[in-house]
Image (cartoon, rainbow, N blue to C red):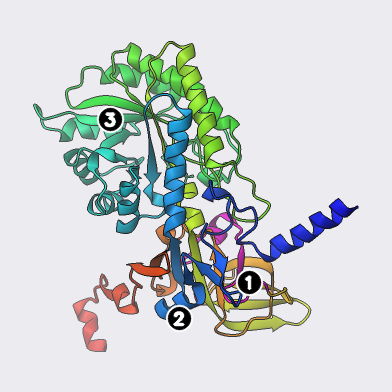
Amino acid sequence: MLVDIGLFVTQTLSSLRPYESKRDPNSPNRNLAPITTELDDQDRLVVGGCRLSDLAQRYGTPLYVLDEESLRSACRAYKQALEKHYPGSSLPIYASKANSSLMMSGLVASEGLGLDAVSAGELLTALQGGMPGDRIVLHGNNKSDDELLIAYRNNVTIVVDNQHDLDRLAALIPAGSDPAKLMLRFTPGIECHTHEYIRTGHLDSKFGFDPDQLESVLTNLVGQPWGVLTGLHAHIGSQIFELEPHRDLAGVMAEALKLARGLGHPVTDLNVGGGLGIRYVESDDPPSIDAWVQVVAEAVANACRQRDLELPRLLCEPGRSLVAPAGVTLYSVGSRKTIPGVRTYVAVDGGMSDNPRPITYQSLYTTCLADRPLAAAEETVNLVGKHCESGDVLLKDLPLPTTTSGDVVAVFATGAYNASMSSNYNRIPRPAAVLVHGGQAELVQKREQPDDLLRYDVLPERFRTLR
Ligand SMILES: *Cc1c(COP(=O)(O)O)cnc(C)c1O
């Protein structure tokens, strides 16, 4: 009986303190809020030593806040787990589509990680942010000639996704010059439980060679002067909580490694992709970074030993689990509409343009008021954005203390696939982003201004007289 009461009390408390619940200092992906989240003497939320409502005041809202300590501890968790669990060499590679900026490139480079890019924009951001070309991997199922050439000239490893990539590289790389470093992506035929839009390992996917094509592609690549095959790649999807698909992947990849090496390709790298999930809401229960790496590392090592293969360098590509938990988005409350007996809408100054995940994937988030995180809920509302779509709902049926215009709302775990997926829908400028650390905040992305949105518009000359 006492135990029951104890549990009840803990659960009530923990749901009042989402930023503290399930805190795991060793694995940021299991935390609902950044590692440094705490309360000041008046119970207001503080991240990276900065009071969130002060940041909102100083930089305006909506505002993306990124906690440097959470970012660095996630990088280190991957590095340390690989060193601990994998007997060979290894490199975690940050999937920059999760959040691409000069700052992110510089930060992950300084932690000794590599970086994946999928476009000329992400490549340039990585290079100019300080990531050495030889630690960058270029992905993409429809790369342009420009993208291939930027990669080649900067010593970036190119992940060949399909025959079109092979044909273009053969045409683009001049005879007698150094070969491009290639990795080959194939679809491993592994299903996992996640949203269908972010599943990539099943056979019916636009990414990578079909496993049935692998042998002929590898055979045709033997002796080509313009490319040298140094790695194999597969990625099964995103926001995955299961470990079995990653274990199964190791066997499929080791078999491909055996085939490639048997044909004489000098394959040293096995790249198992990313996909580890994070905790968005209290009921989510992802494995820790250490547990995920352990399963992957042991499975790869075992699968290689069983086939008498020399251990490859093990690469993995975390995106979400590296950056999502470090992010908090701040919004200001504006208007409200109450429909008696139906529902109350509370509107904030952002929405689907800065966070398209709820409208795209029906994603859930955890939120609280920046200055009253401990206040008891007094009403249930739909927290909505300011865009002209009824689907622009950040959180449905959210229990909240009564809010008034100007209150700052903090939405947690927005570091991944928010800024990078943001749009200018309704011509709404993109938010600023700040990096917080030890009580200091640094602007890492300036707030877009309405004027910026006109920069690429051209008014035809014959319409000018109408103004
Ligand atoms: C998206 C992606 C990743 C990262 O996935 P997360 O789920 O964010 O870890 C890694 N590799 C490739 C090829 C991807 O497309």
Q: Is residue 338 above or below residue 245?
A: below
Instruction: Identify the residue under disc 2.
Output: 57
Q: Position of residue 316 (x, y in %)?
A: 42, 36
Q: Is residue 289 left or right of residue 60?
A: right
Q: Which residue type does callout 3 highlight? A: Leu
Per the rendered image, the range of residues in magenta is 349-374
Q: Toward the viewer: 198 or 267?
A: 267
**Label 2 with label 1: CB-CB less than 8 Å:** no
Instruction: Identify the residue under disc 1.
Output: 373
Q: Toward the viewer: 251 or 413?
A: 413
Q: Residues within 10 Å of mark 1 (few under 14, many from 20)?
A: many
Which residue is drawn at the image coordinates 72% and 81% (left, top)? Answer: 339
Measured in 3D between alpha carbons, the distance from the residue under mark 2 to the one under mark 3, in whole angstroms, is 48 Å
Can you tell me which quadrant of the image ligand 1 is in?
top left
Q: Quadrant of the C terminus?
A: bottom left
Instruction: Identify the residue under disc 3.
Output: 182
Residue 344 visible in this rendered orientation of the protein:
yes
Q: Residues within 10 Å of mark 3 (few under 14, many from 20)?
A: many
